[in-house]
Image: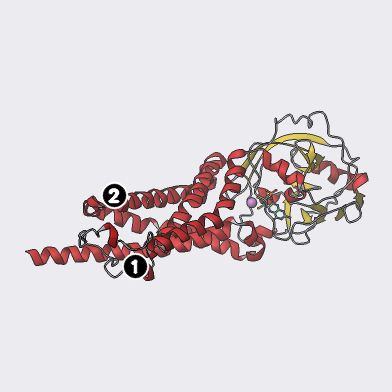
Amino acid sequence: MRRMLDRLRKGFGRKLAKLHTWNGWMVFFLALTGLMLALGFWRSLLGEGRVWIKWLHIGVGIASIVPVLYYLLLAGKHWKQLRSRPWQRFNVLIVLVLLLGWFASGAVLWQFRLAGPRAANAALLVHDILSWAGLPYVIYHSLTRLRWLKEPHRRTVKTGREPVREPLHPAAQGPLMTRRAFIRGAIGVGLAVTLGPSFLRWISASLGGGSSIEALIAEDANRLTPAPTPLPQSSPPIGGGAQGSYRVYTVTRIPAFSNENWSFTIDGLVEHRLSWNWTEFVQLPRTVQVSDFHCVTGWSVYRNTWEGIKLKELLKQAGVKSSAKMVKFYSGDGVYTDSLTLDQADMDDVLVAVLLDGKLIPSDLGGPARLIVPKMYGYKSVKWLNRIELIPDDHVGYWEERGYSKDAWV
Ligand SMILES: Nc1nc2c(c(=O)[nH]1)N[C@H]1C(S)=C(S)[C@@H](COP(=O)(O)O)O[C@H]1N2
Ligand SMILES: [Mo]
């Protein structure tokens, strides 16, 4: 009887250890791919690979629920075993909250179309908070448990009982800090120093709201004069100011423009090829529009007051030939493109925007001129727009070529 119990218990311990290993590798993989997806730096490096990484991240993310569910089956027994170990119980709880939270918010982000922008936005916030709080915890947890840190009497799988050591006489107690405690402390400080600043920056960007556009304006690399005089609806902005913050996305380095190197051209299948320099461009009649901006990765910025030239007015001026089928948009970064059908381009709210909330669009956000297609996801809104070409055939845009849906309707 006793031997059977022992065997069972051993089996149980092994099961838990295996579960822990599997779970650890999954979290490691998800953290790595998640950081690659989240950090802007990787966007330009990865290109096409990004879509693959995204699907791997989603796939493994879905699979990561399996060890959690399996653990929940064993949880009752494990919980009892840990009755004298409050810290381990605490650890189990934290890890469960992290895993379930990542899973739930990840599922919403994966199904962003079903969930809608509000839910996706909230899910992204949760996913981010869990990552910024959870990853340092998980890293700390794994580093401090590496084998080389362990003393021989603390082996991986514990059965719940450990030899009780006789407390040492104060005089016999060794150095103030054991090697173990010292290394733990050092790892903790190291993490705080390396992750702390980006954590704070992220907090202030996502919770502070509003101010980030100001910061981007302050860092604007464009040098174009004259600044267009905003229409009365733009300044102060009738939308009351954009709510939320943009994540600066680019697949190249952020280009910078001045009056010398900037022009705007409409060509291809048009009656009149048109080209403007900045001074001429800001004299074109503009309109003001308030709209929300949604990215497929889950974030949104609400109530942007955009001021710009209606795309359909530009097309009317150029005169679209009957052989034209699509409108192709080129970015001044030399790489990014996208397209709209003639019907889509004819929508009243499609703008070539030059002002956001009454101010020049900063270079990070696609200034001096960017496309705005409010009814479609952000990847249609080509930044640093400087050329529109009317073409006879279909054109597959940058992200669409790399796996984003041709159907970009929000
Ligand atoms: N030239 C260019 N335009 C672009 C992109 C880009 O990488 N390069 N990213 C697109 C995507 S996916 C989104 S969500 C928005 C992001 O706009 P933002 O960087 O101003 O937040 O720009 C779109 N237009
Ligand atoms: Mo996007």
Q: Which residue is drawn at 77% across and 44% down?
A: 361
Q: Which residue is farthest front? A: 171
The N terminus lies in quadrant: bottom left
Quadrant (top left/top right/bottom left/bottom right) for the C terminus: top right
Residue placed most toward the observer, 36 or 287: 36
Proximity of marks 1 and 2: CB atoms separated by less than 8 Å:
no
Q: How crowded is mark 2: few (under 14 residues within 10 Å), some or many (20 or more)?
A: few
Residue 345 seen in this snapshot: no
Residue 56 in the image: above or below residue 285: below
Mark 1 or 2, nearer chain start: 2
Q: Given the image, on which type of amino acid does mark 2 rest? A: Pro
Residue 122 versus residue 333 in the image, above or below: above
Respond yes or no on whether mark 1 lies under 8 Å from ligand 2. Answer: no
Residue located beneath label 1 in the image:
150
Element assignment for label 2: helix
Location of mark 2 (residue): 86
- Amino acid marked by disc 1: Lys
Residue sitting at x 18%, y 63%: 9
Q: Which residue is drawn at 47% across and 63% down?
A: 29
Q: Position of residue 184 (x, y in %)?
A: 42, 60
Q: Is there any visible trace of residue 248 in the rendered image?
A: yes
Rate crowding at label 1 as few (under 14), some (14 to 19) or many (20 or more) other CA atoms within 10 Å: few
Looking at the image, is 231 positioned above or below residue 41?
Answer: above
